[in-house]
Image (cartoon, rainbow, N blue to C red):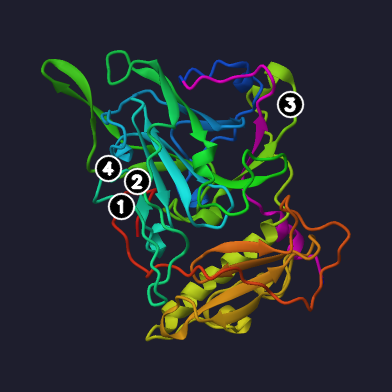
């Protein structure tokens, strides 16, 4: 195999944060101040970019994030440069994205199902959800049920083969009692006469809840584990108006919001988990003491060795969607890689097996309509015996790995070994979902 073309493609990974475990004697209080030693020694991320990457305008204000963890919390700290700190939503589980907000997305096992989202504004109001599947695949989103038009209060996994399901039922989802979060405004909130410099958010995401419905995830995470994560900042245009003799901030309802993110998505949709960035967990102490958090220092850590497989599988999945859209009329998926290259826009680099082996596609009796579904599989070029899989529900998983999530040392890939599929977990019927604003599109 030639590596002349593949090397650059293999290295084109996603943004990543090193998430170091708190050491004995270290603690964090979720008050939004970010004044603990644990944060001072932790480098900030690179500044956020537009959700569409180079296709969108550069952000007007800086946003950055850092993370730590302990046995019970995934800690998140964020800073948003903001000359007009403004927020109206004050109730827990209100529609926070109607204000300027900060959002966290987490998929612990990276299978693209049952991922979690939490949003918070400068008032400290938060909203938390669980997504059984991305909205584009029919969802649903599950939350506390007070927002019936936005999410469901529960999810019941269909038992009949005619109503396939991506996995287990979710009887309820509301982390209001276990989510610890705080915000702090540098300046004044909702006061044009004073203004502001920015605001910060600090969260303890409860690990026990975040690993629910996630197969093969360590609790707490171990050093060397990888989770898929992303962060988003929704920024509305705010104007100064006169009201009752005083100046107030008013949202410009005619202007669409900007969406600035940690890992650009290439499109205006946060709900494509395969395009998110990474959290890499480390049990080693932070390097450089208090200087570790200084500006310009970015720590990313070693790359996920499964990344080439993940990218190849994601491209096969997208190509299958294009293929079925082109033909329609009940035509289902194909088991021909060449057909996906010709009619599904699959990259020839993926089809020829650069980095991750040549894809193998098996048609199944899954959820792909009259013609069933499929499982696409690729073998790792670097991890002995490890095979990655994706099916028509976007679900991604790996076989032939040890408990640490790495290829078994000392083994050679068995090219004749059968490709495995775990228990059938086809998707719910495809739906359009409900419309939503730019940056968290529900389409």
Secondary structure of the residue carrying numbered label 3: loop
**For mark 4, what is the residue?**
255
Q: How crowded is mark 2: few (under 14 residues within 10 Å), some or many (20 or more)?
A: many
Secondary structure of the residue carrying numbered label 4: loop
Q: Residue at x 53, y 73 (%)?
A: 319
**For mark 2, what is the residue?**
143
> Looking at this view, is 183 or 6 the one in front?
183
Dot placed on the residue nearer the N-terminal end, 1 or 3: 1
Q: How crowded is mark 4: few (under 14 residues within 10 Å), some or many (20 or more)?
A: few
Q: Residue at x 15, y 21 (%)?
A: 242
Rendered location of residue 45, percent (x, y): 59, 34
**For mark 3, what is the residue?**
285
Name above or below for residue 207 compared with residue 188.
Answer: below
Q: Which of marks 3 and 2 is in front?
A: 2
Rendered location of residue 51, percent (x, y): 46, 47
Q: Horizontally, is 223 left or right of 82 in the view?
A: right
Secondary structure of the residue carrying numbered label 2: loop
The span picked out in magenta is: 2-30
**For mark 1, what is the residue?**
152
């Amino acid at each position: 195999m030639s590596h002349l073309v593949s090397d650059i493609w293999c290295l084109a990974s996603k943004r990543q944060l090193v998430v170091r475990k708190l050491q004995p004697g270290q603690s964090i209080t979720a008050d939004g101040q970010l004044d603990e030693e644990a944060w001072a020694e932790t480098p900030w991320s690179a500044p956020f970019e537009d959700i569409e990457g180079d296709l969108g305008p550069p952000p007007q204000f800086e946003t950055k994030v850092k993370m730590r963890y302990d046995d019970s919390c995934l800690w998140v700290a964020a800073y948003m440069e903001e000359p007009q700190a403004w927020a109206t939503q004050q109730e827990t589980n209100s529609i926070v994205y109607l204000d300027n907000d900060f959002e966290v997305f987490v998929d612990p096992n990276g299978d693209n199902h049952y991922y979690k989202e939490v949003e918070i504004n400068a008032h400290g109001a938060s909203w938390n959800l669980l997504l059984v599947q991305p909205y584009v695949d029919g969802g649903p989103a599950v939350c506390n049920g007070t927002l019936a038009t936005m999410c469901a209060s529960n999810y019941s996994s269909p038992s009949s083969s005619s109503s396939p399901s991506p996995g287990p039922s979710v009887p309820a989802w509301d982390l209001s009692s276990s989510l610890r979060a705080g915000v702090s405004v540098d300046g004044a909130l909702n006061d044009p006469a004073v203004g502001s410099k920015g605001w910060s958010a600090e969260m303890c995401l409860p690990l026990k809840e975040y690993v629910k419905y996630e197969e093969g995830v360590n609790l707490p995470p171990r050093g060397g584990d990888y989770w898929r994560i992303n962060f988003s900042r929704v920024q509305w245009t705010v104007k100064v108006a006169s009201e009752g003799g005083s100046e107030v901030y008013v949202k410009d309802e005619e202007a669409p919001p900007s969406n600035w993110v940690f890992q650009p998505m290439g499109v205006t949709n946060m709900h494509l988990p395969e395009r998110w960035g990474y959290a890499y967990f480390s049990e080693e102490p932070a390097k450089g003491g208090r200087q570790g958090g200084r500006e310009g220092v970015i720590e990313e850590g070693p790359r996920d060795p499964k990344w080439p497989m993940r990218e190849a599988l994601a491209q096969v999945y997208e190509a299958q969607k294009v293929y079925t859209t082109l033909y329609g009329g009940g035509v289902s998926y194909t088991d021909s890689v060449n057909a996906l290259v010709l009619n599904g826009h699959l990259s020839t680099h993926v089809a020829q097996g650069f980095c991750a082996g040549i894809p193998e596609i098996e048609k199944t009796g899954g959820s792909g309509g009259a013609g069933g579904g499929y499982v696409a599989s690729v073998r790792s070029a670097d991890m002995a015996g490890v095979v990655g899989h994706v099916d028509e529900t976007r679900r991604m998983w790996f076989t032939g790995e040890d408990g640490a999530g790495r290829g078994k040392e000392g083994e050679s890939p068995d090219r004749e070994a059968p490709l495995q599929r775990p228990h059938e977990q086809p998707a719910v019927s495809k739906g359009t979902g409900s419309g939503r604003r730019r940056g968290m599109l529900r389409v």
